[in-house]
Amino acid sequence: MAALGTGGAKETTEWEEILKEKGIIPEKTQEEIAEEQLKTVVEESVARYDPNASKTVEELDEDLEDADSEEERILMKHRETRMMEMQASQSRKRFSPGIHYISAADWKPEVSEAGPDFHIVVLLFQEGTEQSTLMEDILLHLSQKFKHTKFVKCKATDAIANYPDEKIPTVLVYYNGIVKKNFIGLGAFKGLKTDADDVEWELGKLGAVETDMEEAPEKSFSFKRV
């Protein structure tokens, strides 16, 4: 083993562990451990940072005008990646804004066997209820914002006989024919105070919509059953 201060990082660490076991040097405090972990995260982030990674094709083209041969190679690689991402985005299935009404007979072709690689948000509703109207308005708004997600609605008692009113509205999230999650009633959100941000956040966590929200909306609410 190398003498203290002459070996590599791993050897030094092993030597420090021996000294700690013998009580010669103290164990690290939680604060010291946290500080070291934070330092590691920052150093790794700096090491991985690439200023070209988030540039658009147009920005990369501008940089290419003054690039030397090595810079040109790097920039062209990023440009090819951006072009592939743009082509992939354009080829993804897009849906018209709105919530498409389906009957129980439509469920299989429109939902469970609708196709791969896109999410389907299904609203089970009941006519004439405040809760259903609220959720339908929210999903209508989100359908206009997220064109790569399919939004459909079906009358709850048509889809499931004797479906209880207290579970209205129910929102089901499908992907590749499988239910990823269900939200039963407005109590799954913020009751009658639920808004589009609340639903977008939950759908975003599932990957059902490509939200740019970075944190959850305010969670506190007072829900009264009506």
Image (cartoon, rainbow, N blue to C red):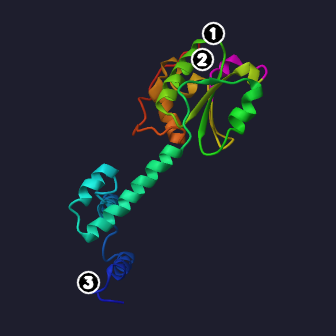
Residue 160, placed above or below residue 40? above
Q: Residue at x 75, y 25 (%)?
A: 104
Secondary structure beneath disc 3?
Answer: loop
- The image position of residue 176, as x and y in percent, is 66, 44
Q: Mark 2 points at which residue?
A: 132
Q: How crowded is mark 1: few (under 14 residues within 10 Å), some or many (20 or more)?
A: few
Identity of the residue furthest to the top in this view: 128
Q: Is residue 164 magenta?
A: yes
Q: Residue at x 25, y 54 (%)?
A: 62
Q: Name the residue under label 1.
A: 128
Secondary structure beneath disc 2?
Answer: helix
Relative horizontal placement of residue 54, taking residue 138 as reference (left or right): left
Q: What residue type is labelled 1?
A: Gly
Res 48 visible: no
Q: Which amino acid does label 2 sit on?
A: Ser
Q: Which amino acid does label 3 sit on?
A: Gly
Relative horizontal placement of residue 72, taking residue 167 as reference (left or right): left
Q: Name the residue under label 3.
A: 5
Q: Which residue is drawn at 77% across and 27% down?
A: 105
| Mark found first going from the N terminus, 3 or 1 | 3
- The image position of residue 188, as x and y in percent, is 57, 28
Res 189 visible: yes
Q: In which quarter of the image is residue 217?
A: top left
Foreground tag (2 vs 3):
2
Q: How crowded is mark 2: few (under 14 residues within 10 Å), some or many (20 or more)?
A: many
Query: Which span is picked out in magenta?
Result: 161-171
Residue 40, placed above or below residue 202? below
- Do the residues bearing badges 1 and 2 touch, measured as CB atoms within 8 Å? yes
Q: Nearer the viewer, residue 219 or 81?
A: 81
Q: Quadrant of residue 114?
A: top right
Tell me the CA gap for discs 3 and 1.
77 Å
